[in-house]
Amino acid sequence: MQELPDVAFDLVENVVVDSDSAKKEVGDLINPITAGTLRESNVIHLAELVAGRRTLSVSGTTIFKSVGYGLVRPLRGPRSSMLPRLPANRGTSLTV
């Protein structure tokens, strides 16, 4: 499913995502990449920006596309087999 109009991708320089799987799961990225209006190399993971491995031009337009589970994922449900099991009432820490 694509939520953003096609014209949005004619205007952007980069798209920042919060998930490694976004390019394969999100219609907002799949459709413009397939159509050639967005290059896959212009889809940047948020972690790359935070770690300083990539930068963005402040003169260009950037879209942030949240897939909804960038840092916190459910521990039960259809994707639970892909996720590590955590003890009850325990989380993980992220050091940046």
Image: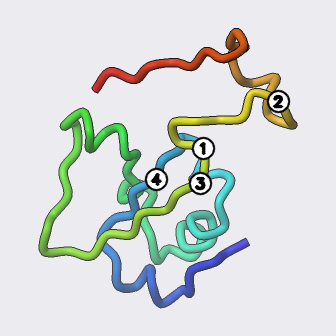
Neighbor class of circle 2 (other Cα within 10 Å; few <14, some 14-19, many 20+) is few
Q: Is residue 44 left or right of residue 27?
A: left
Q: Amino acid at mark 2?
A: Arg
Local SS, label 3? loop
**Residue occupied by mark 1:** 69
Neighbor class of circle 3 (other Cα within 10 Å; few <14, some 14-19, many 20+) is some
Q: Residue at x 72, y 14 (%)?
A: 88
- Alpha carbon distance from label 1 to label 2: 13 Å
- Residue 17's disc is 4
Compare marks 2 and 4 and give the one earlier in the sequence: 4
The spot of residue 3 in percent (x, y) is 63, 78
Q: Residue at x 20, y 74 (%)?
A: 60
Q: Are marks 4 and 3 in contact (CB under 8 Å)?
A: yes
Q: Amino acid at mark 3?
A: Val
- Alpha carbon distance from label 1 to label 3: 6 Å
Q: Is residue 78 left or right of residue 13?
A: right
- Alpha carbon distance from label 3 to label 2: 17 Å
Local SS, label 2? loop
Local SS, label 1? loop
**Residue occupied by mark 2:** 76
Compare marks 4 and 3 and give the one earlier in the sequence: 4
- Quarter of the image with the C terminus is top left
